[in-house]
Amino acid sequence: MTHPVSARPRPGAPSPDPVVRRVQERYHKLLDEGADPHEWPYAWRTELNRGGFRAVDFLMREIVDTGKCIGCASCLTICPVDVFDYEDERPADTRTEACVYCVLCAEVCPVLRPVDKDLPRMLHFRDPQLDEGYGTYSYAMYTRSTDAEILGRGQDGGMVSALMIHGLETGTLGGAILGDVLPDNNQIGTHTLAMTRPEVLACAASRYTYSANTLALQEAMRRDIKPLAVVGVPCQVDGVRLQQNSSIRLEMANWYRDNISLVVGLFCSEAFTHESIIKLGEMIDVAPERIDNINIKGKVVIRLDDGEVREASLKRYRDFARPACLYCLDYGAENADLAAGGIGLDGWTYTLVRTEEGHRALQAAIDDGWLETRPLSDEPRGEFLMNRLSAAKKVNRPLPAQMPTHQERERLGWLDPKTFYTKGPGAPPPPPEEAESAST
Ligand SMILES: Cc1cc2nc3c(=O)[nH]c(=O)nc-3n(C[C@H](O)[C@H](O)[C@H](O)COP(=O)(O)OP(=O)(O)OC[C@H]3O[C@@H](n4cnc5c(N)ncnc54)[C@H](O)[C@@H]3O)c2cc1C
Ligand code: SF4
Ligand code: SF4
């Protein structure tokens, strides 16, 4: 079924550069003709044989200027000549004149197109390869750190931090790409390369604002820190996978492919704007800087700096969901080695093992006594929520390239990513009987 607002996606403004314009036209022709999404990259790959083109202009016009950028930062971390800066959760094309026409930034943008069909070959999904609507996985369970300090600092069961510290201390990891917090605001994240237990612990727990963790990849590569783990939300996982699996084999792509050994994805319904922290403070009548931790459990659970716990309505907080999260259909980090979330048992991490690498890392931590486990059957609601929340993120949604731009959504008066395709302008029209009774 086509959607009323997505039947003809609007192209970004045409570039004055004729080659970039040719790529734009080719890309939109493929979209309009309903070509297989895995063929969309031909729009830019065909230009490579003719010497490439200024792909940064294409990316800025199609994704950034249209407000479709989800901020994953993979265009920045793959660029061999540092064309971009990162500002306001998106790339800024500060040094376009440095562009070497390698086309990598377009190649790795998860909004322009879905990941390649051959990605599973690189990922080595572990048998049995189950698929219940949230990506291939082998098995799932609740896990929790056996270390009181890690458990106390973690968002849920502290599994993610425990796994990172275990890897660093046993030598299977040389570094971990994580999200730290700004010194003067502990609800705003920033990227970091952690190499010690205290550094990992400083990053533990979740910030619900966007943190482009993967910006730290450049430092890891420069310092040749490996093997490397990456922790991030699903959009970042896809960005990393596109970089590792790029068909354009330049130094950066090769380094990421060879040296990122473990990718841990965090389940994600949506992230929130920076303004959301101020608004949340207003909702519970405290100064925002007193908010020590936020956890979302069907409601917003807020721990203050003195340990007091308050609650706020998730429905109201959702008014501050990040609009760019509309362009993302992945709840369960479907291309990660391991995926983790807080659904189900309180104080435990719902853990999905997807690949052989994920299995090896998790089992090593379990075998060394760093993690304890419980079966999902101890709290079946976790699995129920996994199904429901994953489905909610895909229902009615076309691929991001086929969705309206941010500006079009503004004109439609509906920026909420959660409801755009369920209750908003993207929802399918009601069946004729319902439409008739509504109009009488
Ligand atoms: C924006 C966001 C939305 C989420 N939404 C859901 C959800 O809808 N349902 C669900 O079940 N779980 C969700 N999670 C995951 C959940 O909050 C926990 O991260 C997960 O359960 C792992 O818990 P843990 O105790 O094992 O992790 P910990 O040991 O506490 O480690 C957490 C790791 O997350 C990283 N991190 C913290 N904040 C961010 C951020 N903003 N962006 C990227 N990385 C970050 C840190 O670097 C740290 O390494 C979300 C997480 C984030 C960051
Ligand atoms: S979605 Fe990611 S790769 Fe695409 S433009 Fe934004 S930051 Fe760059
Ligand atoms: S909803 Fe998607 S785009 Fe938004 S932060 Fe989560 S993973 Fe990224």
Image (spheres, rainbow, N blue to C red):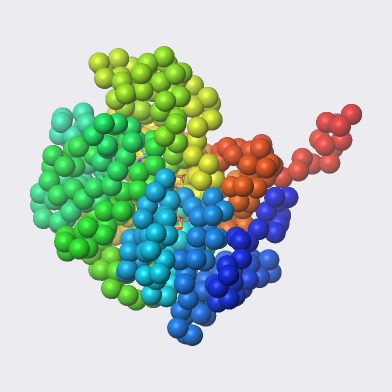
Q: What's the residue at 21%, 50% (across, down)?
A: 193
- Residue extending farthest to the bottom is 50
191 horizontally vs 434: left or right: left
Visible residue check, residue 377: no
Is residue 290 depicted above or below 54 in this figure? above
66 sits left or right of 10 in the view: left
Percent position (x, y) of residue 282?
A: 44, 18
| Foreground of the two, 394 or 77 | 77
Q: Nearer the viewer, residue 45 or 418?
A: 45
Q: Nearer the viewer, residue 397 or 350?
A: 397
Q: Name the image quarter holding the C terminus.
A: top right
Which quarter of the rendered picture does the N terminus lie within?
A: bottom right
Residue name at image x 28 percent, y 47 percent: 191
Instruction: Inspect this view and state whether residue 29 appears.
Output: yes
- Describe residue 84's horizontal placement relative to residue 151 as left or right: right
User: Quarter for ligand 1?
Assistant: top left
**210 or 391: nearer the eye?**
210
Displayed quadrant of residue 411:
top right
315 versus 384 height, above or below: above
Count of all numbered marks drawn on residues in the image: 0
Measuring 39% from the left and 49% from the top, which residue is drawn there?
87
The percent position of residue 399, horizontal first and vertical second, equals 58, 56
Residue that extends furthest to the right in the rendered view of this protein: 440
From the top left corner, tell me how far across and down residue 281 is, in percent.
40, 21
In the drawing, does residue 26 fall left or right of residue 275? Answer: right
x, y percent for residue 70 = 47, 50
